[in-house]
Amino acid sequence: IASDSSFHSEHSSSSIPDLCQGADLSSVQRKFRKETSTGSDTHKIPKSFLLVNDQEILQVSDESDFIDQLGCDRNDTFKVVSIFGNTGDGKSYTLNHTFFGGYEVFKTSPNQSSCTLGVWCSLNLQHKAVIIDTEGLLGSSSNENQ
């Protein structure tokens, strides 16, 4: 069935579907800021850490080190969310806006060059989820056995 409608219009300048372009994320960001602010109104933005480097070497020594890096309790349970896709498709941007109210927890760049090398990890307490950002497929990892 032919259709004149598309997720992308001819005037789109990015790979983000038109459904998302221009979306008002301010309410999500306000809610996130309110939930992450402390008594001194300083925002506590989650941090990400390198889990696997560009040589595909695990950067945590054991389970306890991983839990310490996440900043959670050993008895907490979390879902794991990971994202995969080609280099420059906006994986880090998508995770930042979906789970962290637009804050740059995972590094992004304004162009389609590879920004994420290896595998990065962060914790989203609101959703009780471990968020994993991956290097893009066709990325510049130095290990040829990817």
Image (cartoon, grey):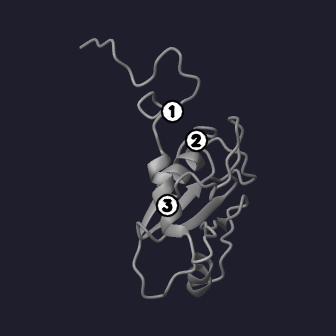
- Report which residue position mark 3 lands on: 32
SS at mark 3 in the image: helix
Q: Residue at x 70, y 63 (%)?
A: 53
**Residue flagged by tag 1: what amino acid is it?**
Ile
Is 6 on the left-hand or right-hand side of 97? left
**Residue flagged by tag 3: what amino acid is it?**
Phe
Crowd band around label 1 with a 10 angstrom C-alpha radius: few (<14), some (14–19), many (20+): some
Q: Residue at x 67, y 62 (%)?
A: 56
Q: Where on the picture, by quarter, is residue 19?
A: top left
Crowd band around label 2 with a 10 angstrom C-alpha radius: few (<14), some (14–19), many (20+): many
**Marked residue nearer the N-terminal end (2 or 1):** 1
Q: Residue at x 56, y 84 (%)?
A: 63
Q: In front: mark 2 or mark 3?
A: 3
- Report which residue position mark 2 lands on: 90
Q: Residue at x 39, y 79 (%)?
A: 77
Say whether marks 2 and 1 touch (CB < 8 Å). Answer: yes
Q: Give the CA distance from mark 1 to mark 3.
A: 22 Å
Say whether marks 2 and 3 touch (CB < 8 Å). Answer: no
Give the camera-side residue of 67 and 25.
Answer: 25
**Marked residue nearer the N-terminal end (1 or 3):** 1
* Farthest-out residue, front: 40
**Residue 39 drawn above or below residue 17:** below
Give the camera-side residue of 129 and 60.
Answer: 129
- Report which residue position mark 1 lands on: 16
